Amino acid sequence: MNIGIIGTGYVGLVTGACFAAKDNTVVCMDSATDKIDTLQRGVIPFSEPELATLVQSNIAQNRLTFTTSLPSVVRHAEILFIAAGTPASLDRAADMSSIDNIIAQLAHIGDMGQKVIVMKSTVPMGTTYKISQQLRHDYVASNPEFLREGRAVHDFFAPDRIVIGADNPSVATTLARLYAPFLEGDAQLFQVSILSAELSKYAANAMLAVRISFANELAHLCEAYGASFAEVKAVMGSDMRIGHQFLSCGIGYGGSCFPKDMHAIIHLARAVEQEMSICSAAQRVNDRQIDRFVHRIRNYFADGLKNKRIAVWGVAFKPGTDDTRSSPSVAIMRQLLDEKAMVVAHDPVAFAHSSGDPITQHITVATSAYDACVDADALLIHTEWDEYRDMDMARVRNMMRRPVIFDGRNLYREKSTALDGFDYFCIGEPIAAECSHTASREPT
Ligand SMILES: NC(=O)c1ccc[n+]([C@@H]2O[C@H](COP(=O)([O-])OP(=O)(O)OC[C@H]3O[C@@H](n4cnc5c(N)ncnc54)[C@H](O)[C@@H]3O)[C@@H](O)[C@H]2O)c1
């Protein structure tokens, strides 16, 4: 089939490359000229495992091309996917300006014939209907995306589920045909109403975020009573009804989806005089998680954080990606900078692309995890990259001015022998006796 993608970011590029790999002819369009220039040279403007090879091989086989021209992608496509960003706006509702802009341009182009217009972005309930009305076009569908950054190509080829929200049966059939090659494993196909499809994406992200905040709140209770979160979680997660996934405590959730989708679902509920009170609470817990972590660090130093040299391992919001959007690591570094600490950060990929987070202008970027620790007054672990799991901690200790670790991901929780000579703080575990003299009440 001839596929067009409007908005070639994480989701649009993965979607385009994976459809191309299944013998479709795909044109990916984006308004960012530099991004399209880069992609036309076969270079991926962000880090995502397997994606570069997939893009390059499909370019070579003439199944994948890139353009900045909306009319040309429309001309090409039988099915047009919209995958532009929907970040949080100032009032924290979904910012629909990119989508609105695309729809206005499509309206200007005119009659879409029988082209199927598919909303892949995460959008408020009712958006797909609104588009149908604005374009006076019945061939529309909602097809939310559930890929995870860092495993995006894998997830697209082997999804847990594919959701097609379409009222028009011919649209549903066309999309089911397009997705048939992706349904060969255990994937479930859900053909649902447009509104259910739109809401299912927010519901899934909200549920996962709530679980993380539940784990974090439970971790505080464990610390207060001297219980071990790891032990409690092992018991709790062994219940088949609960399971172990998304129940890790740490510095909280981040990334380009959970925080803004939590804001959006809360906002969407209010718009119809409902309340997502559990989501609001989960959000508060998540924000507090950062404050508690920084409080613990601040509290360790009798003379404050000013001029302290703080080493940070991990800036991306999770391992496997260079994405630093709403990363807890960035939020923590901002607080440390506000208190005049000097931050030296390392991340295996987050600094690789020039479009990195603006915080890079205010910190020192270390070329290796060891280099970050030279003369450091503290080491903070923010992202659970594999390479941080098996570091030579004796070497790290000798490099540091003051051997203390604040482990925001509990990477070294079970490695007590590697931690000889360190003060070590993780999350959700009893505070070690040698560190307890520094412990004080944390913000509630
Ligand atoms: N990133 C994820 O892991 C993920 C997963 C599932 C769903 N989603 C959802 O998918 C959507 C896209 O997310 P993303 O992470 O790919 O965003 P992104 O910011 O990486 O990409 C969006 C792209 O849209 C382009 N764009 C903006 N306005 C445009 C216009 N008028 N015309 C053409 N292109 C335009 C931007 O230049 C950008 O390249 C969001 O709604 C997001 O919530 C994201």
Image: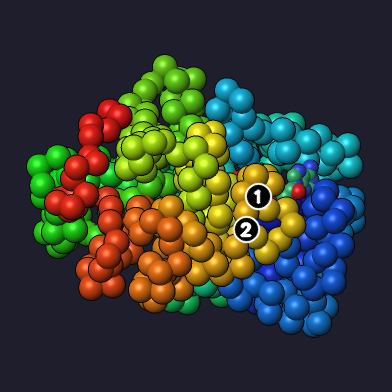
Is the residue 142 above or below the residue 302 in the image?
Answer: below
Q: Is 93 on the left-hand or right-hand side of 133?
A: left
Disc on res. 360:
1
Q: Nearer the viewer, residue 128 or 341?
A: 341
Q: Amino acid at mark 2?
A: Val
Q: Quadrant of the C terminus?
A: top left
The answer, for residue 175, to whether it is visible in the render is: no
Decide: marks 2, 1 in contact (CB < 8 A)? Answer: yes
Badge 2 or badge 1: first in the primary sequence: 1
Is the residue 147 above or below the residue 185 in the image?
Answer: above
At label 2, counting other C-alpha atoms closer than 10 Å, the crowd grade (few under 14, some 14-19, many 20 or more) is some
Q: Position of residue 180 (x, y in %)?
A: 55, 71
Q: Which residue is mark 2?
A: 365
* Colouring used for the render: rainbow
Image-quadrant location for residue 291:
top left
Q: At x 28% / y 53%, what residue is drawn?
A: 425
Q: Amino acid at mark 1?
A: Thr
Q: Position of residue 272 (x, y in %)?
A: 45, 20
